[in-house]
């Protein structure tokens, strides 16, 4: 019984079969990696989880209830939170505000007309956000606006924005894409650190170094179907996987 | 039946004006990604091309009569237009045909206005937020209309269709029922003109290489740019064409509605509604919604329907019908009748 | 721009508001040298200040550019006059009912318009405003009295003050015998302006305001953050519609007459211009913008060919003629032309408006004199509002 159960999901774009009978079981508290060559349908699958796309057929169950047909904010309120491939942040606001917004959304739900109180007077939220910024190592910049940050910092900020919501399931779409080796390692450490909180994570990643240092289980997606699902050590030697990557340099 | 046909015809000429403005709006939006709040002003500028030409052609030579005097005993002034003085009856004919002749001025003039507008101002706004694009074109619209007001005054200036085209066609007589369906000839001309313009724009986009590039640019500007095609220069020309379409539409509309300086904004607001109903970015949608809304508006202003509505307490529906329909359509089909996904989201 | 106030604490906010109140109440004194200290003009400063402040809550915070806010101004005006007609000339019920009715209108129009964003939203609000204008001008003549305009008549019901006001007494709004005209009228509007600016300050600093700013920067992200953005934008729209309704009702408190022209697109465009001229997203900017425009409108409109002749009389005759002719295009009736040109220039060269201009100049001066090396320092020493 997984926390996220994906059953026979199909998605076509015109004639292109992006996803074919995809099945996935993500165990609570585990790190589940989805890998596969470009165009295998990884991002499409992730978009089906957060309400950006709706599968043509099949079901996506989270904690026993369906995610299909829910609006993005409803899915987030249910506890499924996503880190985007290109960092999506509120670039004109300060770092602290960036993290306080999701904290408010977690506490107050999808809408609350809180127009009379001062932002600063919500001490608990503020402290939580400050603590989160400390944890990702951005506490010193909390009053700066986020537009001038490096890509790596933006990614860490976005991670803080997601973690401050205490998600049940965290979706990470290539969390280290475009990062230097040092930044990548720092991110891995960070993700490992938060792993202790029992947050279930789904990671989409190209960088096999990241995948094998993080994942408990790996699903390999190729041409829209899951060809193998297993623990990392068994994936490494799997012929089907190597075939799918056709000499993929990383393996 | 005849009454219905008459309303359809009545709606068509107004709808044609909406369609022509909406066509240009869509063309500019699709290619340049800019919503041109000054497009109504271009329609108005066109209309004032006709006014200018008429004024120039009608310039009069004033001669004091040697023999006749007025009631006050002063010599009678004899006024003859220079055109008549120089060209005789042919001159008079020219004056009579001033509205259609104005198109000859309107085409180059509007083309220049359009190109200057795009090169001089709008191109600096491609990369800026939509709100600023709207604001700058809106400011430009005010400037244009106030300039016209300063030169031509605030009152509408009546323009006449050529005498030959001033009459009406009795469609009823053709079907053996004279008087049942009479339609002003000039409106027929306007309708024909609009159809020709619309078809030429479509043909131009469909069958020329230039049009093909423009259509490709509308679909995916970046890729076309990457192909090494100088898309900017072409888009300048597109802007010029849209200006010409709006301007000539304005010229030809003058005998139907005496132009004044703020006619542009009124037509613009309705044309926006047309674009929204038709679906942003869809040329076909813009044109068909233009005609559709024109006809609906004309039906709502039908005496029978007005009387009927007045009985249930609704008056003046014709004033707001377009807006109501737009609301309904947007509630049912948020992208408009022919809107594509991904445009303006 | 947003940092002008967001960094201050609640206490310093109160201090700023008190300062603002002093500046506003002292207007009759410090505006005198500018020849603008007469009540009629100062009333307009306050009323349009309220209008622009409300508009800024929508446009400045969420980035949704409404082109139809004049509709709420008009709705507020008509409601106020009707309240006068039915209940009497006390301005308080008129203001309350105008705010409520304008809010309801904003709720309906916002509900539909906010289904779309960006350009679509601007177009929809513009169309709605034009529809309201048509409704007021012709369709709803029994309610709005069409092109003549709606005014209070002697034989209106006026439930509460019909007995106290004798036949033939002038129909002027009043509280406890003080007529809302001249200076009392100005002070009445000024108090409301200060209150409404205070409310706007609180909204700007609240979690709600922060959400609205987030809508402006990245609405998609906000959705994926678990926030339903639609009710937030709708609330902002309704609040700003209520500000407009209040402004509209105040116009009728000063002069109990409501006309459809108040709802025309030009009026909607004017409030947009006021806001961007002053500085979008700042508290004080829109009020400065409103005051500047009303001030220059007042000055420019007063010019005619004779006054221009007088001004340029030092020039030789033929030159004077030319200068007068050209200048007259921009003044008097030509004020709108100047307004349009100003509009374009501001959008092209100073999208941040006057407050940004002042900030920039301030920073430039500081840098020149080597004071403001520290960015924090620059922030604090930027020009105080109201100067």
Image (spheres, coloured by chain):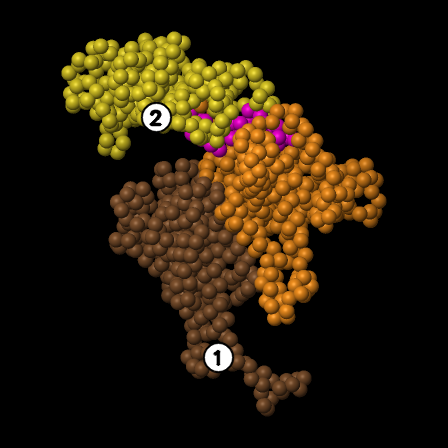
Relative horizontal placement of residue C167, taking residue B189 as reference (left or right): right
In the foreground, B23 or B182: B23
Q: Which residues are magenta?
A: C198-224
Q: Which chain is orange?
A: C
Coordinates of residue B157 in the picture (x, y in percent): 54, 65
Disc number for residue C140: none
Q: How many numbered dots are placed on residues in this image?
A: 2
User: In the structure shown, which secondary structural element does the residue marked by tag 2 occupy?
Assistant: loop
Residue that badge 1 annotates = B82
Question: Which chain letter goes with mark 1?
Answer: B
User: In the structure shown, which secondary structural element does the residue marked by tag 1 occupy?
Assistant: helix
Q: Residue at x 61, y 50 (%)?
A: C261
Q: Which SS does the magenta portion mostly show?
A: helix
In the foreground, B189 or A210: A210
Q: Which chain is brown?
A: B
Q: Residue at x 71, y 37 (%)?
A: C23
| Cα distance in 3D space between marks 1 and 2 | 73 Å
Disc number for residue A85: 2
Specify the quadrant of the image occupied by residue C337. Answer: bottom right
């Amino acid at each position: 019984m997984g926390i996220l159960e994906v059953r026979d999901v199909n998605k076509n774009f015109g004639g292109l079969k992006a996803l074919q009978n995809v099945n996935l079981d993500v165990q609570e508290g585990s790190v589940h990696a989805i890998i596969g060559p470009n165009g295998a349908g990884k991002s499409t699958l992730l978009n089906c989880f957060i309400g950006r796309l709706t599968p043509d057929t099949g079901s996506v169950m989270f904690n026993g209830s369906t995610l299909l047909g829910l609006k993005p904010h409803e899915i987030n309120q249910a506890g499924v939170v996503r880190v985007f491939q290109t960092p999506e942040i509120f670039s004109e606001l300060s770092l602290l505000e960036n993290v306080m917004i999701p904290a408010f959304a977690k506490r107050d739900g999808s809408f609350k007309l809180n127009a009379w109180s001062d932002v600063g007077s919500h001490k608990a939220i503020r402290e939580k956000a400050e603590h989160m910024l400390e944890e990702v190592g951005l506490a010193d910049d909390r009053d700066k606006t986020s537009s001038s940050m490096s890509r790596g910092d933006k990614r860490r900020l976005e991670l803080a924005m997601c973690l401050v919501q205490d998600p049940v399931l965290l979706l990470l779409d290539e969390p280290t894409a475009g990062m230097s080796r040092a930044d990548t390692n720092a991110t891995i450490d960070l993700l490992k650190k938060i792993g202790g909180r029992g947050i279930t994570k789904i990671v989409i990643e190209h960088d096999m170094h990241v995948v094998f240092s993080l994942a408990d289980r790996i699903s390999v997606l190729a041409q829209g179907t899951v060809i193998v699902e297993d623990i990392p050590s068994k994936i490494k030697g799997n012929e089907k996987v190597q075939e799918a990557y056709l000499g993929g340099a990383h393996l | 039946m005849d009454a219905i046909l008459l309303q359809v015809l009545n709606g068509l000429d107004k709808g044609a004006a909406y369609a022509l403005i909406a066509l240009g709006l869509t063309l500019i939006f699709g290619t340049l990604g800019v919503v041109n709040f000054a497009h109504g002003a271009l329609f108005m500028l066109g209309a004032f091309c006709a006014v200018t030409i008429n004024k120039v052609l009608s310039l009069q030579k004033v001669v004091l009569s040697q023999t006749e005097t007025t009631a006050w005993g002063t010599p009678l002034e004899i006024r003859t237009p220079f055109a008549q003085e120089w060209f005789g009856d042919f001159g008079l004919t020219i004056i009579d045909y001033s509205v259609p002749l104005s198109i000859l001025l309107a085409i180059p003039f509007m083309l220049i206005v359009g190109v200057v507008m795009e090169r001089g101002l709008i191109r600096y706004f491609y990369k800026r937020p939509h709100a600023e694009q709207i604001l700058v074109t809106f400011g430009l619209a005010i400037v244009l209309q106030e300039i016209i007001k300063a030169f031509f005054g605030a009152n509408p200036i009546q323009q006449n269709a050529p005498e030959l085209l001033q009459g009406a066609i009795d469609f009823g007589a053709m079907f053996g029922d004279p008087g049942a369906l009479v339609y002003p000839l000039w409106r027929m001309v306007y309708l024909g003109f609009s159809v020709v313009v619309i078809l030429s724009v479509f043909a131009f986009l469909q069958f020329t290489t230039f049009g093909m590039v423009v259509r490709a640019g509308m679909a995916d500007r970046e890729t076309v740019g990457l192909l090494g095609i100088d898309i900017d220069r072409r888009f300048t020309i597109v802007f010029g064409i849209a200006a010409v379409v709006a301007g000539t539409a304005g010229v030809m509309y003058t005998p139907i509605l005496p132009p004044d300086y703020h006619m542009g904004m009124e037509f613009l607001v309705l044309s926006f509604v047309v674009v929204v109903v038709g679906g942003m970015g869809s040329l076909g949608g813009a044109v068909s919604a233009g005609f559709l809304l024109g006809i609906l508006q004309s039906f709502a202003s039908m005496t029978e329907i007005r009387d009927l509505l007045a009985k249930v307490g609704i008056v003046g529906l014709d004033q707001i019908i377009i807006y109501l329909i737009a609301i309904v359509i947007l509630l049912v089909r948020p992208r408009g009748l022919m809107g594509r996904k991904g445009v303006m989201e | 721009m947003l940092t002008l106030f967001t960094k201050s604490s609640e206490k310093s906010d109160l201090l700023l508001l008190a300062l603002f109140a002093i500046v506003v109440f002292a207007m009759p004194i410090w505006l005198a040298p500018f020849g603008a200290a007469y009540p009629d003009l100062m009333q307009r400063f306050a009323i349009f200040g309220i209008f622009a402040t409300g508009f800024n809550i929508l446009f400045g915070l969420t980035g949704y550019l409404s082109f139809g806010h004049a509709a709420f101004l008009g709705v507020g005006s008509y409601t106020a006059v009707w309240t006068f007609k039915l209940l009497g000339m006390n301005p308080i019920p008129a203001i309350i009912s105008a705010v409520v009715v304008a809010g309801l209108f904003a709720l309906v129009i916002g509900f539909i318009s906010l289904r779309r964003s960006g350009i679509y939203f601007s177009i929809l609000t513009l169309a709605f405003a034009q529809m309201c204008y048509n409704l007021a001008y012709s369709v709803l003549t029994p309610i709005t009295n069409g092109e003549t305009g709606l005014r209070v008549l002697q034989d209106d019901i006026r439930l509460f003050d019909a007995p106290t006001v004798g036949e033939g007494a002038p129909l002027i709004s009043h509280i406890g015998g003080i007529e809302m005209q001249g200076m009392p009228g100005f002070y009445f509007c000024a108090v409301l302006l200060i209150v409404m600016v205070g409310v706007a300050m609180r909204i700007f600093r609240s979690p709600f305001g922060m959400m609205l700013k987030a809508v402006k920067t990245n609405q998609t992200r906000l959705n994926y953050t678990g926030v339903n953005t639609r009710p937030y934008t709708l609330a902002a729209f309704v609040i700003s519609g209520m500000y407009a309704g209040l402004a509209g009702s105040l116009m009728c408190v000063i002069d109990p007459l409501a006309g459809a022209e108040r709802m025309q697109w030009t009026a909607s465009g004017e409030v947009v211009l006021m806001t961007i001229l002053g500085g979008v997203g700042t508290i004080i900017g829109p009020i400065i913008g409103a005051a500047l425009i009303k001030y220059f409108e007042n000055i420019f409109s007063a010019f005619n060919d004779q006054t221009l002749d007088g001004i340029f009389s030092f020039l030789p005759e033929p030159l004077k003629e030319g200068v007068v002719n050209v200048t007259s295009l921009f003044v008097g009736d030509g004020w709108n032309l100047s307004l349009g040109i100003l509009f374009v220039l501001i959008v092209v060269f100073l999208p941040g408006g006057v407050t940004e201009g002042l900030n920039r100049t301030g920073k430039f001066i500081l840098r020149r004199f080597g004071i403001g090396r520290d960015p924090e320092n620059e922030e604090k020493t930027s020009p105080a509002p109201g100067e």
